[in-house]
Amino acid sequence: MNRAALLPLAAVLALAGCSAAPGEQGEEAATDVPDAAASAQGVPALQVDVLAEDLDHPWDVARAPDGTLLVDERGGAFTAVRPDGSVQELDADLDDLFADGETGLMGLTLDPAFADNRRFYTCQGVRTDDGAEVQVIAWTVDEGWTAATRVADPLLGGIPVNESSGRHGGCRPRFDTEGQLLVGTGDNAVGSNPQDLGTLAGKVLRIDPATGEASAGNPFLDSPDPVTRLIWTYGHRNVQGIAVQPGTGAVYSVEQGSDRDDEVNRSVPGGNYGWAPEGEGGDYDESVPMTDLALPGAIAAVWSSGDPTIAASGGGFLSGPQWGGYDGVLLLGVQKDTGVLALRLGDDGALVEQFRVPELEDTYGRVRSPVQGDDGALYVTTDNGDGEDQLLRVTPRG
């Protein structure tokens, strides 16, 4: 594997020759979409620095308290970008990784107490004696960032995977304001999964990060089925992003659509988000609406892409006065076409405006994950494949 190479952190690199490349799945392939407004009023100019390159499908990024950036790659690798700019691969046991299509080493997040316990969590495909599944695994990393060790293996297992294609594997872990671990999963392209409370596929789960058990306050804790007790929301197609809104603590999920309506949904405990693609004979019917409001209690999305979709991926809020007009927006990675879409949402979830981030448009290719670090900077992983990917740092100029 071609490993990451450090580039000068202070340089602002205009990589005009880098273009989007098709993904493995048709719904994630690069294609033209209608132009969005270039920017909102009052947004600052942005500086984009390339921190690491020669990555291959980097799925997620997290910034540790010591300033180290931890990146994972879908095909199976952890990379640390250290505060001095050096880049190093971590030694980690990934021999059982199931990496096929959209599934592999996917989302990661650090424990809120990482400074004390050095614990982080991944959501990844795993080969088992019975086939394969998606698992949430807890790891620790040494202070030198040379090795990651599994410590809860798994913390949560039994998340179904599509073994024939890896399609719709999810999978994004994030912490809510109460310190509970949220996990967004995909429906595996199985039509019955999203509405079935007896499976973990097509859901947002909420678990105790110490035990992997259902969190206190979950909406189905009275269910006799331990699987159902883990569920926070259901009726999802492929949850690729989870974002917690600063100030309100509201949880938003980012969901990829088929040929219509990528969605952002505002989570309501026990909410049904209306994806019900099971056709006659159990077929996976992707012609149905992403949210079927005819279903009892179905909750409408706060944002939908319409047709064509953009294959929305990771999502994260920007927060801080240094961001000017970007303060408070939700950023979505764009997997069809290129770049990042910004959504301004009210405290009630209502869409106020949407626009594309100009400095990230048509320059770095497809974007998988925009994540704000604890230093206030925005970190972005691209998703072009073939060892052509980068980790970017984005900051306001001036």
Image (cartoon, rainbow, N blue to C red):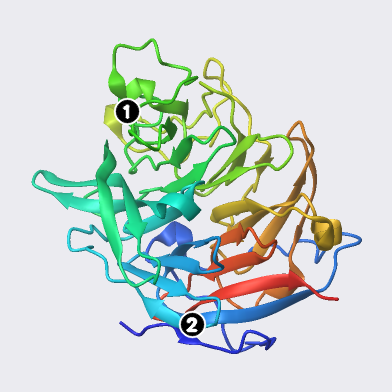
Residue at 26% x, 54% y is 150
For this rendering, which residue is in front, 317 or 338?
Answer: 317
Image coordinates for residue 23, horizontal then vertical, percent: 42, 67
Work out which quarter of the rendered image holds the C terminus and state it: bottom right
- Disc 1 is placed on an element classified as helix
- Disc 2 is placed on an element classified as strand
The kind of residue on which mark 1 rests is Glu
- Kindly indicate whether the residue at mark 1 contacts the one at mark 2 (C-beta within 8 angstroms): no
Residue bearing the label numbered 1:
280
Q: Dot 1: few (<14), some (14–19), or many (≥20) neighbours within 10 Å?
A: few
Residue at 67% x, 88% y is 11
Q: Dot 2: few (<14), some (14–19), or many (≥20) neighbours within 10 Å?
A: many
Residue bearing the label numbered 2:
53
Image coordinates for residue 244, horizontal then vertical, percent: 62, 42
Find the distance from the CA under tag 2 to the CA under tag 1: 47 Å
**Viewed as shown, does residue 109 lie left or right of 39?**
left
Q: Is residue 165 above or below residue 30?
A: above
Residue at 68% x, 58% y is 341
Q: Residue 149 shows which numbered tag?
A: none
| Front of the two marks 2 and 1 | 2
Q: Earlier in the sequence, mark 2 or mark 1?
A: 2
Image coordinates for residue 340, horizontal then vertical, percent: 65, 63
Q: Residue furthest front?
A: 116
For this rendering, which residue is in front, 41 or 30?
Answer: 41
User: Looking at the image, how many numbered discs can be counted on the residues?
Assistant: 2
Residue 105 seen in the current view = yes
Work out which quarter of the rendered image holds the N terminus and state it: bottom left
**Viewed as shown, does residue 334 lie left or right of 91?**
right
For this rendering, which residue is in front, 322 or 394?
Answer: 322
Residue at 77% x, 49% y is 328
The kind of residue on which mark 2 rests is Glu
